[in-house]
Image (tube, rainbow, N blue to C red):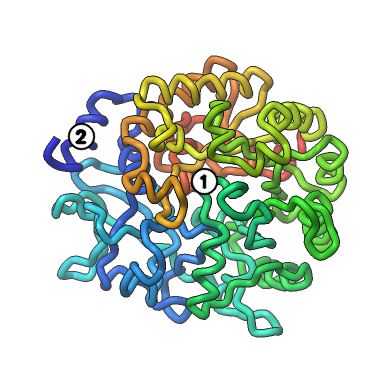
């Protein structure tokens, strides 16, 4: 096919049951988008909420390679609406790629639009600067640095440990740039706190709670790198858990509390629950055994794939299956040189994993792989996985949920095209819009 437009339109025609909004969203997530200077933010001094780099870079270039987008940050997310395809409101996490065929730019009247192959295909909305970003902590740190919000303000993302103790080629996950992202921000002289003090987190949350008068922020996620030893004298469960304990004591019931951590032994998982965590994300990353061993060497060495999966199932006995939501990185299944050679093979493998977990009542979710250039898989696969893989995955995901009678997981806001706010994949955009949102603390606490 001669253009990206032709590829996208062909897939929309071949897979009409997948919302066309999701087709564009997946293409933007896997391949990135370029920004005209007219579409960049004025960082924390402007009217647009800037990209916070909340854990990974999610860019197709290093900061020095992004040009003006490294100096004036792009928006955290964009909203697509209208255009010749009649797109419903679609929230997309920003992944910068100066070479992308997609470009965000202002027209002669100053209105932002998304352009593909030179043609305007959608109107673009950008997130307004939230009032809580305009206030600083008592030590001068910004709320955006300590407790950024994503998913159009729905989720407070607390990366309380910004590096990973899986380190080097023999341990780091081969698609992950958490350690490089830390290094590039420090090299650029940006504030990028390695270990966030619990009192700083609480102060930032106080500011958010005070100025988020519409209560748009509904959940928080505690996350960061894997801990194989200790941080500040605490093991992984105690390190991440003690933030949850402090938050729940200070703000009981204000937000749905989630934690992303390794698949830990049952006693450690129980500690998360005791600390007040409501949703547990023990990410399984990729289903295929061979690929897990190759792409997640540290996790294979310290835990092992079979034990990882056993611990996920065990955690459902503590949190309830509905509140265990492991993530996988959609697309690495097809990464050269080790991945599957065909979309058919990759979808079959991923669906096998979905069926395994969903047969136990556990609903995984996924992040669309962004091939960051400082990672081994990103270097070898700058184009990422084929768009067809991502579209067929959405189809297989929804079908598998239907097969096991499952509904959208709690803590992700409303499902359905035109309603979803989850921004780093289209799984929520592709689920039925008629479901009630399982996004209250009460619903999440059910076991």
Q: Is residue 129 above or below residue 410?
A: below
Q: Which residue position is annotated with label 2?
A: 9
Q: Which residue position is annotated with label 1?
A: 174
Coordinates of residue 52 in the picture (x, y in percent):
51, 66
- In the rendered image, the quadrant that contains the N terminus is top left
Q: Is residue 147 above or below residue 281?
A: below
Instruction: Determine whether, in the image, residue 379 is placed left or right of residue 287.
Output: left
In this view, the mark in front (2 or 1)? 1
What label does residue 427 carry, if any?
none
The residue nearer to you, when weighing 25 against 385, is 385
Q: Is residue 138 above or below residue 126?
A: below
Coordinates of residue 105 in the picture (x, y in percent):
24, 64
- Residue 220 shows in the view: no
- Residue 236 shows in the view: yes
Query: Label 1: few (<14), some or many (≥20) within 10 Å?
Result: many
When asked about the image quadrant of residue 37, the answer is bottom left
The residue nearer to you, when weighing 326 against 444, is 326
Question: Which structural element holds mark 2?
Answer: helix
- In the rendered image, the quadrant that contains the C terminus is top right
Q: Is residue 100 above or below residue 22?
A: below
Query: Label 2: few (<14), some or many (≥20) within 10 Å?
Result: some
Q: Residue at x 38, y 77 (%)?
A: 71
Image mark count? 2
Coordinates of residue 427 in the picture (x, y in percent):
47, 36
The residue nearer to you, when weighing 361 against 311, is 311
Measure the alpha-carbon separation of dots 2 and 1.
Answer: 32 Å
């Amino acid at each position: 096919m001669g253009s990206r437009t032709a590829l996208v339109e062909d897939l929309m025609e071949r897979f009409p049951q997948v919302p066309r909004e999701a087709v564009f969203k997946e293409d933007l997530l896997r391949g990135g988008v370029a920004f005209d200077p007219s579409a960049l933010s004025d960082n924390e001094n402007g009217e647009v909420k800037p990209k916070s780099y909340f854990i990974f870079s999610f860019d197709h270039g290093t900061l020095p390679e992004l040009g003006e987008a490294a100096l004036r940050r792009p928006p955290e997310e964009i909203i697509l609406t209208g255009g010749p395809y009649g797109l419903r409101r679609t929230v997309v996490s920003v992944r910068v790629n100066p070479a992308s065929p997609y470009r965000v730019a202002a027209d002669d009247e100053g209105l932002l639009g998304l352009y593909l192959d030179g043609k305007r295909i959608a109107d673009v909305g950008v997130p307004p600067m939230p009032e809580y970003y305009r206030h600083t902590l008592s030590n001068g740190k910004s709320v955006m640095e300590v407790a950024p919000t994503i998913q159009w303000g729905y989720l407070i993302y607390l990366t309380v440990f910004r590096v990973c103790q899986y380190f080097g080629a023999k341990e780091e996950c081969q698609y992950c740039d958490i350690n490089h992202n830390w290094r590039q921000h420090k090299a650029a002289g940006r504030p990028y706190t390695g270990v966030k003090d619990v009192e700083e987190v609480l102060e930032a949350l106080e500011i958010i709670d005070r100025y988020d008068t519409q209560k748009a922020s509904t959940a928080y996620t505690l996350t960061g790198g894997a801990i194989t030893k200790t941080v500040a004298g605490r093991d992984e469960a105690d390190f991440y858990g003690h933030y949850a304990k402090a938050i729940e004591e200070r703000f009981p019931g204000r937000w749905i509390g989630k934690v992303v951590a390794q698949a830990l032994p049952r006693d450690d998982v129980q500690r998360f629950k005791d600390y007040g965590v409501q949703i547990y994300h023990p990410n399984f990353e990729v289903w295929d055994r061979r690929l897990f061993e190759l792409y997640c060497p540290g996790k294979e060495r310290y835990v092992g794939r079979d034990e990882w999966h056993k611990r996920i199932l065990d955690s459902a006995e503590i949190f309830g299956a509905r509140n265990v939501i492991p993530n996988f990185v959609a697309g690495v299944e097809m990464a050269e040189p080790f991945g599957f050679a065909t979309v058919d093979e990759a979808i079959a493998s991923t669906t096998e994993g979905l069926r395994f977990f969903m047969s136990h009542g556990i609903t995984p979710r996924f992040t669309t792989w962004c091939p960051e250039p400082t990672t081994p898989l990103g270097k070898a696969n700058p184009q990422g996985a084929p768009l067809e893989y991502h579209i067929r995955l959405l189809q297989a995901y929804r079908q598998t949920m239907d097969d096991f009678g499952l509904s959208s997981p709690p803590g992700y806001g409303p499902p359905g095209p035109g309603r979803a706010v989850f921004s780093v994949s289209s799984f929520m955009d592709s689920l039925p819009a008629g479901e009630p949102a399982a996004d209250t603390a009460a619903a999440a606490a059910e076991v």
